[in-house]
Image (cartoon, grey):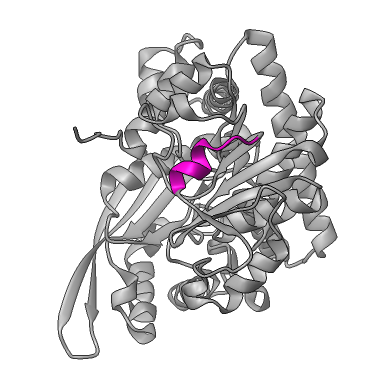
Amino acid sequence: MEVVLMSLAAATKYFFEQAAQGLDLEPGVKQMLETPQRELLVQVPLVKEDGTLEVYSGFRVQHNDARGPFKGGFRFHPSVDLDEVRGLAALMTWKCAAVNIPYGGGKGGVAVDPFTLNKRELKQLTRTFVSKIFPIIGQKVDVPAPDVNTNAEVMGWFVDKANELARDDVRGIVTGKPIGIGGSLGRTEATGRGVALTTLRLLKWLGKDPTKMTVAVQGFGNNGSWTAYYLHQAGCRIVAVSDVSGGFGNEEGLDIPAMMEYCKTSDKHLLAGYPDADPISNAELLEGKVDILIPAALENQITKENAARIQAPIVIEAANAPTTPEGDAILNERGITLVPDILANAGGVTVSYFEWVQNLQSFYWDEDTVNTHLTNIMHKAFDDIWNLAKERDLTLRTAAYTIAIERVVEAMKMKGLFV
């Protein structure tokens, strides 16, 4: 029988409503929190090298700006649609509020397979998309960033077109840029560093020694590889990792720096063919006997179909929405400690915030300053959420959403958006 998985938008709404039940929100306030403030659908035409015209659909959803400018990446992927972007925008609102950085939530994208385009076509597509959404974005209004299939180079094209349209230097209109045009030191590693900081903070609260912990990381892209790297540095034994090309395990511990070096020169920068570990399946990684499981790849990885077989007593959601609501309920029933995505992977948007601050001030920090501020914010956010969970007998996910919702509602109240 085919398993029908909940969309990211539906899952985000479910977790929001789970937390909102304990907050006695007025129906109108709840509706304001659930409904995006603005949704934009645009045509993105592209004349290809062979002279044919392709027209793609582009989206920008602005969910809530009560606490500050809309913030969230934009992606190039064939699956992009309004429902997906809407869910990701809401997730950004709660993520920024959970770690208490002064942003609201937004998200965008173009429904295109970027691997069918050459570099000139991809650059033109980016610049056209910028021109289409430019009327509703701005460095103090809505600040995009990289996401799936968009990187620092794409952000460079983005800011160049934005500067042209603004007839001004508006480098703070987008984050994740190359260092030479306003990017921040430490941004590349930030999401993985944040996941590692969160994991180590949890271990401290639980009184566990990192050097005695075994870890499996699903996903070895930017997020997963840096997560594994920093936990490896902290003394954890990383016994399994995987990417789209397959998984690898070693009970004695994997050499994470060596695997990262291998991926720099491997075909498509994937793990396939790595010689110094045993191949394992995705199911073996997720369901293996480890102390900490870190899904850092795709959505819907822990579901009602496999949640009962998860052996790790700790799950850290490095990816967005890797656990379905049904899977989440099973993990909770089994007493598994889960750190939710809106806390665990917030290191990326936090250092994007630092980049934005540096752009607005035209004053740039060294990497130690970036990392010190990131550590302080992630530790404070974790401690606030942990303490609320213990105080109100909540899961860490519900506690994170509760804090986020309370902060957004308070900001809306202060602005007089409802009385």
Residue 28 horizontal/vertical position (percent): 36, 18
Task: Identify the residue shown where x is 73% and y is 46%.
Answer: 237
Relative to 284, residue 326 above or below: above
Quadrant showing the N terminus: top left
Q: Between 259 and 294, which is closer to the camera in this rendering?
A: 259
The dominant secondary structure in magenta is helix
Magenta region includes residue 283: yes
Q: Between 181 and 274, which is closer to the camera in this rendering?
A: 274
Residue sitting at the far bottom: 50
Residue 8 horizontal/vertical position (percent): 36, 38
Which quadrant would residue 345 be assigned to in this image? top right
- Count numbered badges in the picture: 0
Q: Between 300 and 308, which is closer to the camera in this rendering?
A: 308
Magenta region includes residue 212: no
Residue 186 horizontal/vertical position (percent): 72, 62
Task: Identify the residue shown where x is 67% and y is 24%.
Answer: 385
Relative to 8, residue 253 above or below: below
> 65 left or right of 60?
right
Res. 67 in view: no
The residue segment tinted magenta is: 282-290
Which quadrant would residue 150 be assigned to in this image? bottom left
> 336 left or right of 137?
right
